[in-house]
Image (cartoon, rainbow, N blue to C red):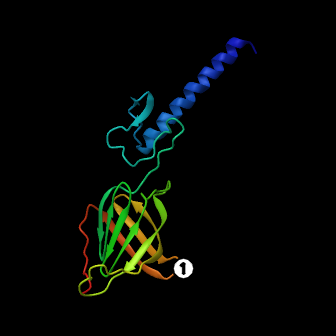
Amino acid sequence: MNRLWKSTIIVFLFFVGTAFLFISHADRGDKLVASVARNNGHPKKVPAEGEHGMVGLPINGEVRTKRVPVGLWGGDHISMEVTERRTTVEYDCANGTIDQRIALDRRGRFDVSGIHAPEHGGPVRQNELLNGYPVQFTGRISGKRMYLTVKRRDNGELIGTFTLVHGVEPRLMKCR
């Protein structure tokens, strides 16, 4: 096969592959990165509008990860406040923390470690330490709903299962 045909086939395959990539992302509704900005001579990702927290194309070898959306998640007997760096959880008679941003897999599932600290009725005294223990937060997100299970890591005891909704006020009944 001569060089011209080989070059033509390579160019054709490149365009077909590129078109497939864009079409497959468009079908899923993913937004592509809008542009690349320069910061001190180094490329920096600039996401397209409405893209925060979505999986996108890798840039400079980095793979962006889908994460639990920032904000208040509320449900019966639970509240979660998700920030860029950590998550705080409040239950009727306990609280908890997850000291990382929660990453999701392709199916919207997560599995992260955290701390759970039971509370008691009445006032909390100044300098009082609440004894917490390690727990595992597992669940999945579907649309604006989160399905969450919390279990102790040492013995597997179920703390609870919860359904939360992003942007909804929690319904807590604090212990007295």
Category of crowding for the residue at label 1, using alpha-carbon neighbours closer than 10 angstroms: few (below 14), some (14–19), many (at least 20)? few
What residue appears at the point 41 percent right and 76 percent down from the top-left corner? 116
Q: Which of 124 and 79 is in front in this view?
A: 124
From the viewer's perspective, is 8 left or right of 1? left
Q: Residue furthest right?
A: 1
Which quadrant, please, contains the N terminus? top right
> Percent x, y for residue 114?
45, 69
> Percent x, y for residue 169?
23, 67
> Percent x, y for residue 147?
40, 68
Q: How many marks?
A: 1
Which quadrant, please, contains the C terminus? bottom left
Q: Nearer the viewer, residue 6 or 113?
A: 113
Which quarter of the picture shows residue 124? bottom left
**Residue with the mark numbered 1:** 154
Task: Identify the amino acid type marked 1.
Answer: Asp
Q: Which residue lies furthest to the front in this view?
A: 127
Which quarter of the picture shows residue 75? bottom left
What residue appears at the point 36 percent right and 43 percent down from the top-left corner? 51
From the viewer's perspective, is 165 left or right of 17? left
Is residue 150 shown above or below 54? Answer: below
> Percent x, y for residue 166?
30, 61
What element does badge 1 sit on? loop
Which quarter of the picture shows residue 127? bottom left
What residue appears at the point 41 percent right and 79 percent down from the top-left corner? 160
Is residue 148 shown above or below 37? Answer: below
What residue appears at the point 38 percent right and 60 percent down from the top-left corner? 86
